[in-house]
Every structure is written in structure tokens, then in C-alpha cells.
Amino acid sequence: LAGLGRCYEVLQNPDRSFALYTEALQADQAYLPAFIGQAEALFRLGRVKDALPRYQHLVYGYKLDVFRPQLARLELRAA
């Protein structure tokens, strides 16, 4: 399902990619590619308040510093 979510990302359809990533996470809550995809889809949908805690978890929980710039942008938008 996460692979299909990625396909819809490429097609610039964040609604459908979010739905597929959510389904993938229901099957396996620890599946990191689906978690990342869901966070990115929420950002593309303009759902900053929903995307922010996911990016915080990516940066502070998973220690993925590659997402730190995106987190900073989200924190500025949410303020």
C-alpha cells in the first residue's frame, strides 16, 4: 500500500496518497516509509497542525535529521 501511496505522490494526488499511507500504517504502525509518506501528504494537503507532530516524531523520535528543515518550516507556519 505504501508503494501505491508513493505512486500517487508522484501523480501529485496527496488525498489518495494520504489514504493509502494510512491504510499501510493500520497494517503495520512501525512501517517507517508509510509514516514518512503520511507526514508529507498531510503537509501537501495544508494540514500543518496534523503534520507537525509527525515531523517532530521523525526528527526527535527516529532521529532523522534530514527532516529537520521541514519541521522548522512547519513550526514557523503553525506559530
Image: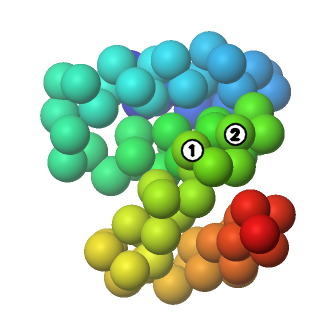
Residue 4: in sight, yes or no?
no
Spot occupied by residue 12 in the image (x, y as percentages of width and height): 80, 27
Q: Amino acid at mark 1?
A: Asp
Which residue, given by chain and number where applicable, does mark 2 sit on?
47
**Residue at position x 51%, y 84% from top?**
65
Q: Amino acid at mark 2?
A: Arg
Work out which quarter of the rendered image holds the N terminus and state it: top left
The answer to whether the residue labelled 2 contacts the one labelled 1, judged by CB atoms less than 8 Å apart, is yes
The 10 Å Cα crowd at callout 1, few under 14, some 14 to 19, many 20 or more, is: few
Which residue, given by chain and number where applicable, does mark 1 sit on?
50
**Which scheme is used to colour this image of the protein?**
rainbow
**Residue at position x 62%, y 15% from top?**
16
Q: Is residue 26 above or below residue 62?
A: above
Identity of the residue furthest to the front in this view: 79
The 10 Å Cα crowd at callout 2, few under 14, some 14 to 19, many 20 or more, is: some
Q: Is residue 5 above or below residue 53?
A: above
Relative placement, left or right, of 51 versus 23 is right
Spot occupied by residue 60 in the image (x, y as percentages of width and height): 38, 80
Looking at the rendered structure, the secondary structure element under dot 1 is helix
Q: Which mark is drawn over residue 59?
A: none
Spot occupied by residue 62 in the image (x, y as percentages of width and height): 32, 73
Q: Nearer the viewer, residue 66 or 61?
A: 61
Looking at the rendered structure, the secondary structure element under dot 2 is loop
